[in-house]
């Protein structure tokens, strides 16, 4: 039995990052996009900038792992499975190019847009966990 006939390990390692990547895109499309529509623009841009700085590392890592693992799966498979794995690699690479050439330049422009005027006593940012907020008692800055 040849290695190409049973690429089970390659299949497992291709499915995990591809599934996580699809889930992340799905979550963003279903939840984040609609949540952005319900908040004021200043909140949206502040959150968007922060989200994209963290998101960039995670999503691009998942895209790279998906491209690499599906290429390995394509090399270890035969027939239709090889074509499907190669197609998955092409689609992941297309997502990477769209993100790098489309979203990243847009996000860089959003970062430099002027933020709305803030009261002089309001800090520009606060460390996570520094101030607790709850509906009953809003944080005081």
Image: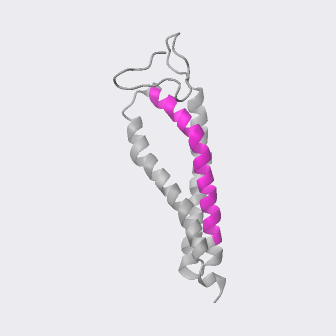
Instruction: Residue at the far left: name it.
Output: 136
Magenta part, dominant SS? helix
- Residue at the spot x=62%, y=52% of the render? 61
Q: Nearer the viewer, residue 75 or 90?
A: 75
Is 97 a magenta residue?
no
The segment highlighted magenta reads 43-72
Q: How far from the left and from the top, in percent, is residue 12? A: 56, 69
- Asked if one can make out residue 21 in the rendered structure from this viewpoint, the answer is yes
Colouring used for the render: one colour
Position of 131 relative to 71 (above/below): above
Instruction: Judge left or right: residue 136 versus residue 18.
Output: left
- Residue at the spot x=59%, y=63% of the render? 90
Position of 77 relative to 113 (above/below): below
Residue 93 figure quarter: bottom right
- Asked if one can make out residue 97 in the rendered structure from this viewpoint, the answer is no
Is 57 a magenta residue?
yes
Q: How far from the left and from the top, in percent, is residue 36? A: 41, 36
Residue 84 figure quarter: bottom right
Q: Nearer the viewer, residue 47 or 80?
A: 47
């Amino acid at each position: 039995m040849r290695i190409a006939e049973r690429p089970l390990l390659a299949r497992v390692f291709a499915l995990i990052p591809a599934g996580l990547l699809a889930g992340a895109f799905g979550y963003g499309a279903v939840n984040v996009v609609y949540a952005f529509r319900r908040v004021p623009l200043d909140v949206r841009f502040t959150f968007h900038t922060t989200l994209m700085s963290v998101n960039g590392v995670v999503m691009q890592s998942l895209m790279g792992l998906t491209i690499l693992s599906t290429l390995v799966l394509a090399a270890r498979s035969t027939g239709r499975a090889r074509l499907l794995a190669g197609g998955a690699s092409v689609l992941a690479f297309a997502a990477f190019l769209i993100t790098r050439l489309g979203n990243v330049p847009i996000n860089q422009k959003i970062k430099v847009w002027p933020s709305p005027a803030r009261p002089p006593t309001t800090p520009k940012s606060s460390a996570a966990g520094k101030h607790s907020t709850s509906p009953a008692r809003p944080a005081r800055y």
